[in-house]
Amino acid sequence: MSGRARLALCAAAATLMASCALLPLVSPATWLFQAVFLVAVQSGVGALTRRVPLARPLTLACQVVVTLLLVTLIFARSQAVAGFVPGPDAFHHFGVLLQSGAEDVGRYAIPAPLTPGIRLMIVGGVVLIGLLVDALAVTFRAAAPAGLPLLALYSVAAGLSNGGTDWMWFLVAAGGYLMLLLAEGRDRLSQWGRVFSGAPRTPGAEAGGAVAPVRTGRRIGAVALGVALVVPLALPSLKGGLLDGAGTGVGDGLGDGGTISAVNPLVSLRDSLNVDQDRQVMAYRTNTDDNQDMYLRIVALDDFDGTTWKPAQRHISAVPDALPTPIGLAGGVRRTEIETRISAADWYAQDWLPMPYPATSVKIKGSWRYEPVGRTLVGDHGQNTRGLQYSVKSLIVQPTAEQLAAAPEPPEALKREFTKVPGSLPAVVAQTARRVTSGSSNHYEEAVKLQDYFAVDGGFTYSTQVQVGTGPNAIARFLQDKQGFCVHFSFAMAAMARTLGIPARVAVGFTPGSPQADGSMSVGLRDAHAWPELYFEGVGWTRFEPTPTRGSTPAYTQSDTPSGNNQGVPQPSLSSSTAPSIAPSASESCTAQERKLEACPSQSSQAVVASGNDGPPWYQILAWTLLGLVLVALPLTPMLWRLRSRAVRLASAQHASSGPPRGGVRGRERKAGTQYTDDVGMTVLPGQALPGRVAEVAVGHTLAVWRELTDTAWDYGIVPDDALTPRKAAERIVRLGGLDASTAEAVHRVAGAVEQVLFAPQPRAQAGLVDDVRRLRVALRSTASRRTRVRAVVAPRSAMRAVWAVSDGWADLRARWSARWAALVRRPSGQRSG
């Protein structure tokens, strides 16, 4: 393998190694196979065009064109001309996919589902970085600056990642970059010949070579990587650096006694509520007819720092066969156990498992862990809900108002943890809580009054266009503006309940969803919701619904309240919005854009949205790719063959004119009377003794220049006549081409060199013949029409020689096989048949 080819291979490998840092961001990681395929083809095209050779801009242009064709084949096949040629519709589809991908990036937590938009962004980004690295390191021979796009690729991945393995991806990316630098250094050293590094250390060892510099480079690279990894650990004040993760992530897989710390799952809740078209998240069936309390709970947010609510760091353990009895639930409270079968969409990749609360047992496949305080299941080692089907047994707890009103004080430890509020919480929050609940005789009455204040008589309106809000004054601003969505209402009620001494937290999940014709329930993005849970001893964690026109108000807060303060809370519909939730099975509601993205939900209760498919099978992509390459390369074959033949002929002739062959003059000589036939078909007539190797080199290279001169004239319309002598052929080219005196002299000089090597006693190569051929090409091009100039480049007439060569090769092959077959079947003499 040549040094340039080895460098191209290292550039592609470095790009793919750096792109591995993107693996934790999306799931599944099937995009990597497409990226590997595209980068490999892109690098192969670059290697072929550099071998022709083409000018550097043309090499880059060929790589861009082939890459664009392949990307169009994979991502916009139905919108492209002939399936792979991009047109206006294909570019419009690319824009739609990129816009959809940008929205998906902001909507989903890590690891995000591999939607078509995200897949195009990741694969296209890796291919673009691969193109830049190949152009810088191989085409323009500047490997060091090629580290900048690799660093950009890793930095984007590290900035978005919330895992603790960023150091590992840094090692992989840095190793690829060092490999690229070493390959480039070795290639440069090889151009200088052997490197003398002193006498060998051991007897018989070979001195020299590029071993010492390469070994030194490896040592420097190892030391640099060690410093990059060790220094941040030795300096704890340097946080959030290049090797530092963005968060601890979810489910690190520490086994029994491990801990879990998650990012806030409310980041994209408002975006889910504001989608233009609802998308099915999951479908479920249950064995109860009362679905209004079937909230699918994902996680409980119990850590309140005055700015936001988030899950606290908790210990996790293996999922037990039967979950323990919910904390605080006494025997006198009415309860019913139900069973629910849930099917999640194959694009919905959530680390936490949506379940009815409180669950008593879960049957699910995969790597899941149990967090006992929140009674939640969390994915371990990258496990998520994508396409899962699972069953959950849970309790429908139906306390009475009297039981809640008579609830005793909770345990001191629980109360201390779940009534904690930071000192930065504005005083107006506690003041408003006391004012709204004045006259209450117990915590239950206070909770009902808080719920009614937000949902009924406080003058609050529901709007998803309001920002979530940050900082300690966010709740105070909400109490003043009285406008927000479920995040504002649940956050505010839970914080106010804590100021009153009621243990409170915020739950995140989905409202029951919409009933379907087949008896199942469909849960969409618009059903995403957040609600407060308040703790009452003897009942446990109890749901309240302060958000107006959302979800369902619990029955135990509507009638027979001991305070007699029944505000007649209206019953919201089962849907999670004022309008009925759009059923995912209604294909008529699919927009044209979603049909293009294959995002229309299915009708079956067990079916899920297939918007995140991974495209056609690899063998189909490979077949279309090969067909596309053939269709693209076929019209360019004459041009590429002509460029290659010209480069080989002129390069060999220029090398021959600079001196004797590298191997020197060999002792064997070609005797007089021997015939020499070159690739033109001209025969060296018997003459005086010729020095064998020198004569062959001189004759071959000079005739190659003559061939190039006649082919150049042929490309511009002067058909060669092999019946003429070189001198007569030169006169014909000068006459038909209308050449000036200097160019005519150059043509005759080449013809004279041909006669000299064919008939001189001691032939030798003549210098300057390559420049003479180039002078002829410039002269013919300057006088030719535009059509003739274009044809001479794109469809040269002399490319017919390639067809003749194939035909002659095929005839020669047939003759040899015929002779070999005849020798096999020929009967040896002296033997008789029978």
Image (tube, rainbow, N blue to C red):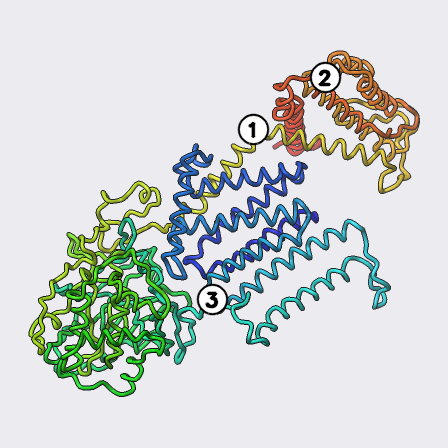
Depicted 416 relative to depicted 240: above or below: below
Of the residues shown, which amino acid type is indicated by label 1? Pro
Secondary structure under badge 2? loop
At 21% from the left edge and 64% from the top edge, which residue is drawn? 547
Q: Please state the horizontal and vertical placement of residue 742, each as a whole percent of the image.
A: 82, 19
Circles 2 and 3: CB atoms closer than 8 Å = no
Asked where in the image residue 349 lies, by quadrant, the reply is bottom left
Q: Which of marks 2 and 1 is in front?
A: 1
- State how far apart marks 2 and 3 are (Cα): 71 Å
- State how far apart marks 2 and 1 are (Cα): 24 Å
Secondary structure under badge 1? helix
State the residue position of label 2. 720
State the residue position of label 1. 635
N-term-proximal mark, 2 vs 3: 3
Depicted 214 relative to depicted 137: above or below: below
State the residue position of label 3. 246
Residue 485 visible in the picture: yes
N-term-proximal mark, 2 vs 1: 1
Quadrant of the drawing holding the C terminus: top right
Q: Please state the horizontal and vertical placement of residue 710, each as a whole percent of the image.
A: 74, 21
